[in-house]
Image (cartoon, helix red, strand yellow):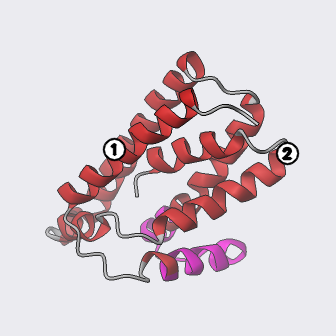
Amino acid sequence: MFITVHVATAVVISETISSRIIGFVAGVISHLFLDFFPHGDKGLKEWVEKTPKRKKIKILFVALTDILFVWVFAIFAMKRLPISNPEVAYWTSVGSAVPDLIWGLYIITGKRIKPLGTISKLHDKIQNTWKDNLSLKSGIAIQIPLLLSLIWAQINIPKL
């Protein structure tokens, strides 16, 4: 799943949390929960692996594109979304990005960073629980409405 969707989920979740630490942990857990469901990673993986010599460049392209969308979403969220505790929203969002950042380091370096290896292995296991046969287009078709629903929820659902 694209990090933008994970971050949007984290912003919504952060409205129910008052602690940065709990927010960070909730962000990691929400990431793992969302990645449990098929979301088109197989299609993305197939595209990346079509040209093995360009694999790292393609991964970097996808990562930078996703980071650009996160940046645009963050600016939009700060300007337009009602966020009751921006500091908690920030740390929940960071937590929601951590599993993919750890995965990215593993893909680029070929090594698991020891203290983070457990999260990386758990992320891989959850990500591969179901056979994700969705194409990249289907994955995007699922993630865009989910993202828009999260933005709608943040604007319209009353805060606790």
Nearest-to-viewer mark from 1 and 2 = 1
Name the main secondary structure of what is drawn in magenta.
helix
Q: Position of residue 78 (x, y in %)?
A: 59, 22
Mark 1 near mark 2, Cβ–Cβ under 8 Å? no
The answer to whether 13 appears left or right of 129 in the picture is: right
Residue with the mark numbered 1 = 145
Q: Residue at x 47, y 67 (%)?
A: 35
The residue stretch that appears in magenta: 104-125
The quadrant in which the N terminus is found is bottom left
The dot on residue 19 is 2
Q: Is residue 102 visible?
A: no
Q: Position of residue 77 (x, y in %)?
A: 55, 26
Tell me which residue sits at (44%, 83%) in the image: 129
Q: Is residue 140 above or below residue 82?
A: below
**Farthest residue toward the left?**
50
* Nearer-the-camera pick, 157 or 28: 157
Q: Give the residue at x 60% y 59%.
A: 30
In this view of the protein, can residue 126 be seen by the observer? yes
Quadrant of the rendered image containing residue 138? bottom left
